[in-house]
Image (cartoon, rainbow, N blue to C red):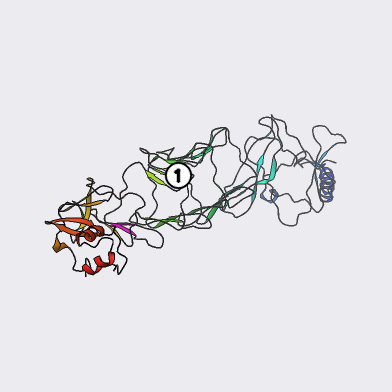
Amino acid sequence: MAITATQIESSNSLEQFRQQFNNLQSDVTGLEGGTLSFSAITTTSQNTTTLNVREDGTITFEGATDDGFETTLTVVDPTADRTITFPDGTGTVALTSTTVDAATEATNVTVTANNSTNETIFLTFVDGATGTQGIETDTGLTYNPSTGLLTSAKLLVADDGTIGSASSTSAITISSAGIVTLVDDLLIKDGGTIGAASSTSAITIASTGIVTFVDDILIKDSGTIGSASSTSAITIGSDGVVAFIDDIKIKDGGTIGVASAVDAMTVSAAGIVTFKDDILIKDGGTIGVTSSTSAITISSGGIVTLVDDLLIKDGGTIGVASTAAAITIASDGDITTSADLTVGTLFKMPDVTSTKILVADGTSYQEVSVSGDVTIANTGAVTIAANAVEGSMLNTNAISGQTELASGIADTDELLISDAGTLKRVDASVFKTYIGAADDATALAIALG
């Protein structure tokens, strides 16, 4: 029911005052019991600025038509003091179950900055680009305001799209072929790894910069490895030949090796290269430089062929594992060997004039020509000149030092005799005739003493 009491004027009778007083009592009882309804409450009194509704009380709105349908405003039993504040604006209050059409839906929301709370929040999104959409979340798409970590299962950018920062918006570019280009260095933590799903630590980079691969490095045939200023610094052919367009430099005393022999090759500060074991190239393989690609050739038989000079440092040595300094070459070209020198075929001197021989002069061997009473051929045959042998050249035992013939002198035995100063040979038979003892060898022997 509605409020029935009305205002009393000074001209009203006592009966009218009694009636309105009774009406007022009924109205108060109705307000207290929650059975009284009214269309408006108007007051300027400070004592009525707060309207308290008793337990389980409601406020009922009749609406524009006084009929059997009303709108009732009520609250859930509060567990603490609650305040609902209506904004300073004109509009329609929507219910949680109400679908708001495009003409009345909100286009702005009030947000609060959260830059430091260490918590996981879920980013919201919608299914469509326009129109009425339901807001959704994905447990795989999260963000932490404290760490700045954005987590997502995948991140896709357009072909040739970029990823960057405020100062370098295109720090990373991803082409349509999947090639990733960085505009500057790629830094990971000391001892960090780079890998794939099946090999998460395929590449490890130590704090010293040493890069370790757990397996092979493969690039396309004739592929190149380089830098911004020299994109093809290293080229690897389909046959495995590695070509460098310039020097290879490592730190002083640095090493090059493999997993089982990390210091297989050491390069000292002086440029000396030391190998722990053999160096193997293919049969007939070559070693060279850009201007002379086949400067050194090693045949299948181990023969090493140089297309030009072999130069080592002054006082440098050539040797083997057991005798590292087998050969030393001084700055003036002198060659010193630590053991025997064996020549396999020909030994050539600067002057190879036919028939000259090597003669020691106290400091070295010199090539000299044979002179005097003998000559020598280039075959090694020595010839004594005629009339060159004199008595003073003969040893005193020239005769006594020979094997003795004690008996059995034959007619054909020969003797040396001076014929008026000319040495001639003579048969024993001539002496037999000379002494008149023909066919008597015994007499000849007696005659000869």
Q: Is residue 288 above or below residue 372?
A: above
**Quadrant location of residue 433?**
bottom left
Specify the farthest residue to the right. Answer: 68
**In the structure shown, which secondary structural element does the residue marked by tag 1 occupy?**
loop
The answer to whether residue 91 is left or right of residue 321 is: right
Specify the farthest residue to the left. Answer: 420
Decide whether residue 113 is among the magenta residues. Answer: no
User: Toward the viewer: 58 or 379?
Assistant: 379
Residue pointed to by mark 1:
299
Crowding at label 1, few (<14), some or many (≥20) Cα neighbours within 10 Å?
some
Going 24% across and 48% down the picture, which residue do you hit? 377
Q: Percent position (x, y) of residue 288?
A: 39, 42
**Quadrant location of residue 449?**
bottom left
From which residue to which does the magenta span run? 311-333
Can residue 276 be seen in the rendering of this structure?
yes
Decide whether residue 319 is among the magenta residues. Answer: yes
Q: Percent position (x, y) of residue 147?
A: 56, 53
Q: Percent position (x, y) of residue 56?
A: 82, 52
The answer to whether residue 268 is left or right of residue 423 is: right
User: Which amino acid is tagged 1?
Assistant: Ser
The answer to whether residue 181 is left or right of residue 399 is: right
Q: Quadrant of the N terminus?
A: top right
